[in-house]
Image (cartoon, rainbow, N blue to C red):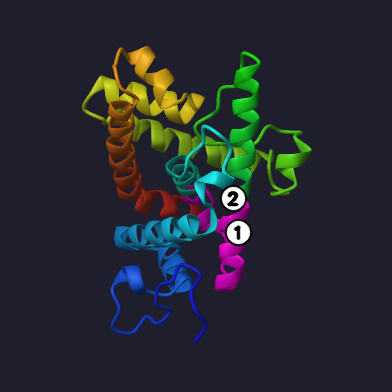
Amino acid sequence: MEEDPTGMSDSPQDASPEELATTFIARQIQSDEPDAEYWTAMAAKVDAFLRRSYPERALPHGYVLDDLRQDVFVRLVGDMPSMEIHDRDRFWGFVKTLADRCAIDAARILKAQKRGGGKKPLDNQATVGDPLANAFDERAGTPTEHARAAEIEEHELACVDKLTRDESKQVYLLRRRELKSYDEIAEITGRRKAVTVRTIYARAQRDVTACLQARLDGYVSSVRS
C-alpha cells in the first residue's frame, strides 16, 4: 500500500473519516448525498498536505500558511463537484497547482499594493489574460469558471455576514480581500497589537470555514444536477 502524501491511512476499512483514502473521500463529496464530515476530513488532509509542502519561508512575504489554506479550500469548494478524480497522485497534483496559483496571485497583489493598488477578489481568481496565472489552469477566465467563482464568493460572503461581531467581519475581509498585514489591520481597526488582530482573524476564519462546510452539501448537489 502506497503512502498517502498527507501521512494518513489509505484504507477505508475500520477507519474514521479523517483516516480514509483521499480518492474515497473525494468521491463521497461528489456523491448525490455528500456528508459534511467528508469535507471536514478533506480539509484536514489538505491542511496536512500544505503544511508539509509549503513552509512559510517559501511563501510571499505578508502571505502566511493560514492565508494559503483558506484560499485553497475556497477554490476546492468550487472545483471539487465537477473534478474528475482518477487517482490520488493526480488529485494532489491539482491541489499543488491550486496552491501555487494562489501564492502567485498573492505575490502579484502584494506587489501591486506597494505601488498603491491591488485588491483581491474573494474567490482568488487570477486576472484574465495573465499568462503566468493562466498557465496553471487552461479553464481560467471561461464563463463557467467565472459563474462558479461568483457562486462560491456568494457562499463565503454569506458566511462572513453570519459572524456575530462587526470587527470580525472587518478583520476577515481586510485580510482575505486586501491581504492587509496584521499591523495594518490593527491600525485600521484601532487595535493596539497585531497579535490581537491575528487572534480575531483566526477565530473568524474558523467560523467561516465551518459555515462553508455546512453549506457545501447543497452546493455540490446543485453543481452535479
194 left or right of 101? left
> Residue visible at 60% across and 20% down?
113
> Residue visible at 39% across and 20% down?
185
198, above or below 140, in the image: above
Q: Answer with the quarter of the image where residue 196 lies.
A: top left
158 left or right of 57? left
Q: Which residue is mark 1?
A: 94
Q: How many other residues sit within 10 Å of disc 1, few (<14), some (14-19) or many (≥20)? A: some
In percent of width and height, residue 134 lies at 73, 43
Q: Answer with the quarter of the image where residue 9 lies.
A: bottom left
Q: Secondary structure at mark 1?
A: helix
Q: Which residues are magenta?
A: 76-98
> Foreground residue, 219 or 93?
93
Q: Secondary structure at mark 2?
A: helix
> Foreground residue, 144 or 38?
38
Asked if one can make out residue 106 in the rendered structure from this viewpoint, the answer is yes
